Image: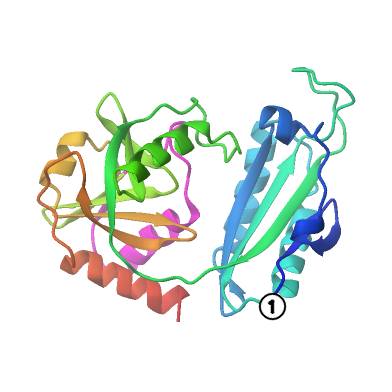
Amino acid sequence: MTKRIGIYNGSLDQLDKIVVSPMSRAFLFSDSIYEVIPFHKSEFIGFQAHIERLDRSAAMLDINIDINLCAQEIILLKERSQFPSGYIYYQVSRGIDQKRSHIFSGGIPETFGFAEPHKFQQSSIKVKLVPDIRWGRCDIKSTSLLGNTMQMNSADKDGCSEVIMHRDNILTEGGASNIFLVLDDVIKTPSLDQNILPGITRDLVIHTIAELDLKVMETECFVEDLKIANSIWFTSSTKGITEVESISNLDTSIKRGHPIFSEVSQRYIEKFLT
């Protein structure tokens, strides 16, 4: 079995040998950001877009990072991983404090990452509709994911592997993905705002849809739309494009294998996963 490789503040080691200080602000406050960068057949998918989003997240939290160094560490992890396909988890915290304080001291940012094998397999999933209980800046890819994990684990008890979140009946996103709906041959996805992470795969799929001369609208989407949608999908770095087969707590009209989903999914696979 290939041992998993990690990196901590520039030093490579086996993942299970890496030691992180309990005074890390990532540990004490979730004062950190992260990216999940997929690769297939040793080639990154959307690498530059992930790096640019990491840089934006750091700027929005006023974490002063060396983005070129971060990119080099991510590339090094992929090269040393020996996995043909997988993803890099990469995290940057504000640093390590001498004492626990809400006021950060402006220390040196702390970097941590690891490589994980992953098979990009297409399969439909069962999901659950839940209120969006997360903090108000979901456009920042912060490690503060308690709201996501609470709702995802609640859904898991109902045999669901994802959630569709909403605020006052306006759809936001999944627990770990963006959402698309097909209504009368028009593809819709929620407009980006502070409640929605600008997904890299979301953007790749929107461009793929445009290449197929299909219509996509970035607009407000509602719980009522779920009931009449012909098809619902999720997109993420590890899911690619994943079709929803049912919503456990909502009656819908969706059917697996919708022609538009199949066309977009096939083109995405041809572009990035073959």
Question: In the image, is residue 208 above or below residue 231?
Answer: below
Question: In the image, is residue 259 above or below residue 25?
Answer: below
Residue 257 spot, x, y in % from top left: 18, 68
> Residue at horizontal 23%, vertical 57%?
215
Residue 44 spot, x, y in % from top left: 59, 69
Residue 204 within the magenta-colored segment of the rendering: yes
Residue 94 spot, x, y in % from top left: 77, 34
In the rendered image, the quadrant that contains the C terminus is bottom left
Q: Quadrant of residue 166?
A: top left
Q: Residue furthest right?
A: 98
> Residue at horizontal 11%, vertical 43%?
251
In the rendered image, the quadrant that contains the N terminus is bottom right
Q: How many marks?
A: 1
* Residue linked to disc 1: 82
> Residue at horizontal 82%, vertical 31%?
23
Where disc 1 sits, the SS reads: loop
Q: Amino acid at mark 1?
A: Gln
Which is nearer the eye, 36 or 196? 36
Which is nearer the eye, 194 or 235? 235
Question: In the image, is residue 89 above or below residue 25?
Answer: below
Left or right for 104, reference 58: right
> Residue at horizontal 10%, vertical 53%?
184
Other-residue count near label 1 (Cα within 10 Å), few / some / many at <14 / 14–19 / ≥20: some
Q: Is residue 122 visible?
A: yes
Q: Which residues are magenta?
A: 190-216
Q: Is residue 217 visible?
A: no
